[in-house]
Amino acid sequence: MLTKVTKLEELEGFRLGVHFSDGSHGVHDFSDLAKKPGEMREPLRDLAFFARAFLEFGAPTWPNGYDIAPEWLFREMMAAKELNKVAAE
């Protein structure tokens, strides 16, 4: 099963609340990503532009077409111990 992001929540600064299709969720700080060089990342340095993130096919995406693979984001958040699981009901 492919991991997809099902919901994004805008938080302060370069942080987003991220919910995944497996029920896990957490908060990730994207400030390091925004600081990295690259033409597609440059607009992300503007907080107003960064806040315009949306989901396209389960991937966090910005209006300039920059997107993040949900599987990569899941692994990053898992390694940083940023993920929580929703308890089964």
Image (tube, grey):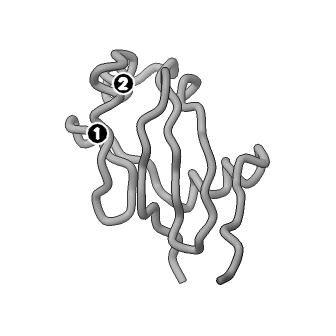
Work out whether 50 lies above or below 37: below
Expressed as whole percent of the image width and height from the top left, the position of residue 20 reads 53, 64
Q: Residue type at mark 1?
A: Trp
Residues packed near mark 1 inside 10 Å, few (<14), some (14 to 19) or many (20 plus): many
Give residue 85's quadrant in the image. Answer: bottom right
Mark 2 highlights which residue?
44
Which mark, by number, is residue 82? none
Q: Is residue 56 left or right of residue 80?
A: left
Q: Secondary structure at mark 1?
A: loop
- Residue 62: assigned label: 1
Instruction: Tell me how far mark 1 sits from mark 2, CA to CA.
Output: 8 Å
Element assignment for label 2: helix
Question: Residue 62: horizontal and vertical position, in percent?
Answer: 28, 39
At horizontal 46% and vertical 19% (from top left) the residue drawn is 37
Tell me if residue 19 comes above or below residue 4 in the rendering.
above
> Quick one: quadrant of the N terminus?
bottom right
In the image, 76 versus 14, the foreground residue is: 14
Q: Residue at x 71, y 73 (%)?
A: 87
Residue at image point 47% right, 32% down: 11
Name the residue located 27 percent from the left edge and 34 percent from the top edge.
Answer: 52
Horizontal side, residue 53 vs residue 36: left or right: left
Rendered view: 19 above or below 62: below
Q: Position of residue 76 (x, y in %)?
A: 67, 48
Q: Are marks 1 and 2 in contact (CB under 8 Å)?
A: yes
Q: Crowdedness of circle 2 by 10 Å Cα count: few (<14), some, many (20+)? A: many
Comparing 69 with 11, the one in front is 11
